[in-house]
Image: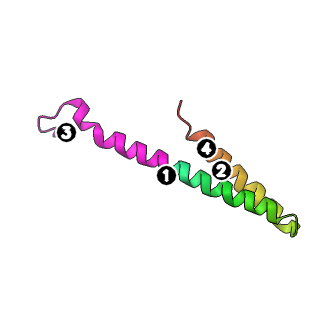
Amino acid sequence: MFNCGKTAGERDGGVMLQAFLMQRAMAVLSALLGGLGVFCVIYSFSTPDIAAEALILLGAALAVSYFTARK
């Protein structure tokens, strides 16, 4: 609405920064979920009850990384 004399490229800089930061945050979330999922897989050999949590965590990490991938 009020562009204050800025060009289109200057106005979109903040939006691109937000998109970049959100993409990086999703990558970090995916790495954390995947790491915790792998830990649960390894730990499930001694405690089989954790195997379901491992599958859920690994599936969530896969979904996050798949749907936030650059195209």
Q: Residue at x 15, y 40 (%)?
A: 2
Amino acid type, residue under disc 2 in the picture: Ala
Residue plotted at (61% across, 52% down): 31
Residue 53 in percent (x, y) is at 76, 62
Q: CA distance from mark 1 to mark 2?
A: 13 Å
Distance CA(mark 3)–CA(mark 1) = 30 Å
* Dot 4 and dot 2 residues touching (CB under 8 Å): yes
Q: Which mark is residue 10?
A: none
- Residue 61 is tagged as 2
Asked if residue 14 lies left or right of residue 37, the reply is: left
Tag shown at residue 65: 4
Q: What residue type is disc 3 on? A: Met
CA–CA distance in space, label 3 to label 4: 35 Å
Q: Is residue 12 magenta?
A: yes
Say which element carries label 2.
helix
Dominant SS type (magenta): helix
Q: Quadrant of the N terminus?
A: top left
- Find numbered disc 4 in the image and state the secondary structure of the residue it sits on: helix
Q: CA distance from mark 4 to mark 2?
A: 6 Å
Amino acid, disc 4: Ser
The label nearer to you, 3 versus 4, is 4
